[in-house]
Amino acid sequence: MVDTYIFKALADPTRRKVFEKLAGGSLNASALRDGLEISQPAMSQHLAVLRAAGLVREQRQGRFVNYEVDPDGIASIGTWLARYRAYWPKRIEALSDLLKDMDQ
Amino acid sequence: MVDTYIFKALADPTRRKVFEKLAGGSLNASALRDGLEISQPAMSQHLAVLRAAGLVREQRQGRFVNYEVDPDGIASIGTWLARYRAYWPKRIEALSDLLKDMDQ
DNA sequence: ACGATACATAAGCATGTGCTTATGTATCGG
DNA sequence: CCGATACATAAGCACATGCTTATGTATCGT
């Protein structure tokens, strides 16, 4: 199951923080450690999990590895979530925001 | 973190199957076991996890406990996902379906 | 060429997770 | 009332997970 990797990856609070940081723009592994109290190997392992889940992709640049959000990952969640749209409350702010953004 | 409970709950394939079954309509704990090869206590424990995550809610009816999808749970995921709408691919089928449904 | 830097990988360990069997609690039918 | 049914809870166990320290690999600056 592809979904299992994604949900497992997002089940960890540290990984969600990392993902949110990347949503603000591409960053390398060291920069991602700022603020989060986490060792270098721990970050490396978290990034490997996020990458395996398809939530993040990397781009080597010399000594640095730049990470960025992989749209495929969130698309997968969107696809999964869409299966349950029948239960989506009619008036939820986040959804109307989403709707507005798409209507362009 | 509320999100942690939700993502942890959905990280298990069996729980996702249970949730999908419930998306097709309300069912009691025994009916949910059909098809899934799972013991009665295991199902009870899975349902407890889904319930604690806010993905599912229960309703006692005599000896039976009826479970159904809790819209608050998927709304939480939608809210979380909406934070990353900037990375959402423009043309994903599930999304346009969602859009269509909302435009009513 | 060499030390420093950026990151990955390996191994070990504490804790979490999902299952099992056993048992408890409540409601139903007769 | 009493056995059967529906479900929950407890305890124990195998395995997964996230961390640590130690070490490996590749690139940079000089």
Image (cartoon, coloured by chain):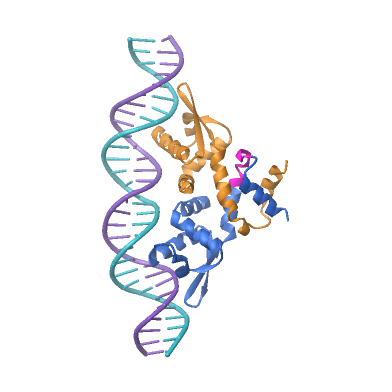
Chain colours: A orange, B blue, C cyan, D purple
Q: Which residues are magenta?
A: B81-89
Please report the residue visible at 51 percent of the width from the left and 73 percent of the height from the top.
Answer: B60
Identify the residue at horizontal 48%, vertical 45% (top origin): A6
Q: Is residue A38 visible?
A: no
Q: Is residue B41 placed above or below B78 in the rendered structure?
A: below
Going 58% across and 53% down the picture, which residue do you hit?
B76
At 48% from the left edge and 56% from the top edge, which residue is drawn? B16
Total marks in image: 0
Would you identify the image quadrant in which residue A45 lies?
top left
Q: Is residue D9 above or below residue B77?
A: below
Where is residue B92? Give x, y as percent: 62, 43
Percent coordinates x, y for residue D30 in the rendering:
43, 9
Q: Quadrant of the C terminus of chain B?
A: bottom right
Position in image of residue D23 (x %, y %): 29, 27
Q: Position of residue A58 (x, y in %)?
A: 49, 31
The image quadrant of residue D18 is top left
Against C26, residue B56 (above or below) is above
The answer, for residue B100, to whether it is visible in the render is yes
Q: Is residue B53 magenta?
A: no
Answer with left or right where residue A1 lies relative to residue A96: left
